[in-house]
Amino acid sequence: MGIRYGIGALIAVTALLLAGSGIATLSRGWLLPWQRRHVVRQLFAWAQLLIAIALGIQLIGLRAVDSACRTVFTMPGSVVLLLALVLITRAQRPRGTGQGD
């Protein structure tokens, strides 16, 4: 009961925060101030939503009792996390080649 619930709660809170941030970016175009110049908003928002989904899948796998069931949930969760990583990489804006950059 102990540590699994603590880790599960941490994963759930992180997933909810990422989902909220992704929805805010998609609906209002809002990003955290330090991200505004460096990412393409739509791609980054979809990446955040994918990470939230992957964390939810991982959370279901954490709650699974049987180790075979745990693998069924953690592997797709890992694949979704990798897809989100690709989206985050694609969302990065290239650095300028000007004098001030």
Image (spheres, rainbow, N blue to C red):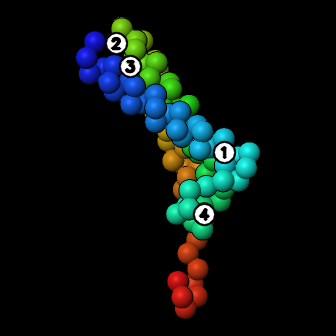
Q: Secondary structure at mark 1?
A: helix
Disc 3 packing (10 Å; few <14; some 14–19; many ≥20): many
Disc number lying in front (2 or 3): 3
Residue farthest to the left, as pictured: 2
Residue located 66% across and 41% down the image? 23
Residue 3: quadrant of the picture: top left
Residue holding disc 3? 62
Residue holding disc 4? 36
- Vertical comparison of 71 with 13: above or below: above
Given the image, on which type of amino acid does mark 1 rest?
A: Ala
* Distance from the alpha carbon under mark 2 to that under mark 3: 10 Å
Mark 1 or mark 4, earlier in chain: 1
Given the image, on which type of amino acid does mark 2 rest?
A: Ser
In the image shown, does 75 or 64 lie closer to the viewer?
A: 64
In the image shown, does 68 or 58 lie closer to the viewer?
A: 58
Pinpoint residue 8: horizontal percent, then vertical percent.
Answer: 38, 24
